Image: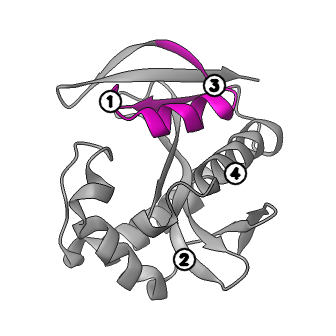
Amino acid sequence: MKILETERLLLRDQRPEDADVLAKMFADEEVMRFIGDGKTYPRSVVEQSIAKWNDYGRKFGYTSWAVVRKEDNAFIGKCGFNRLPDDSDIELAYMLDEPFWGKGYATEIASATLEHGIKKLGMKRVVALVYPQNSPSIRVIEKSGMKYEKQYEYKGIKMLMYAKEA
């Protein structure tokens, strides 16, 4: 199911056929370096991940959706929302496969997803967590209209928290 569409991209539910690209991403140290705790994951985690995020979406009305390039229907990453582990906020999170970095896709999909969360899903506040040394992602978050708020610790890792309120 299509969630939203931008000029070049669309968000849809994750599908089993996304597993090959997702497994490649989960195993890539460079892609995973600034995702969560920075660890890579084996393919066995991928199928569980797809099912888990689709179940999460049915439960909460939002999830981590597949990012697809419209020109060739290529699955290039994920973007969406999840609750922070301490249940304090809803986080905007995204990850793209490395061949698609530096092309404006992250800003395009993050901005549209943030707007979708606030305007269509009625979210009052959305945050983004970013490693302080991940300057490309900080630029994406700032271009999306989020403002620096504070430091946040996730699994012992000091991150920066940005936020946007409706």
Residue 29 falls inside the magenta stretch = no
Q: Classify residue 146 as left or right of residue 85.
A: right
Query: Depth check: 133 or 120 in front?
Result: 133
Nearer mark to the viewer, of 4 and 3: 4
The residue tagged with tag 4: helix, strand or loop?
Answer: helix
Name the residue tied to disc 1.
133
Residue 145 falls inside the magenta stretch = yes
Q: Indicate whether 102 appears above or below 27.
A: above
Cα–Cα gap, marks 1 and 3 = 17 Å
Name the residue tied to disc 3.
146
Q: Residues within 10 Å of mark 2 (few under 14, many from 20)?
A: many
Q: Indicate whether 141 appears above or below 78.
A: above
**N-terminal-most mark, 2 or 4:** 2
Q: Amino acid at mark 3?
A: Met
Percent across and percent down for residue 147 are 60, 18
Q: Residues within 10 Å of mark 3 (few under 14, many from 20)?
A: many
Part of the protein shown in magenta: 125-149
Name the residue tied to disc 4.
108
The residue tagged with tag 1: helix, strand or loop?
Answer: loop
Cα–Cα gap, marks 4 and 3 = 14 Å
The residue tagged with tag 3: helix, strand or loop?
Answer: loop
Cα–Cα gap, marks 2 and 4 = 15 Å
Q: Classify residue 157 as left or right of residue 9.
A: left
Instruction: Tell me, for residue 75, which label it has, or none.
Output: 2
Q: Amino acid at mark 1?
A: Gln
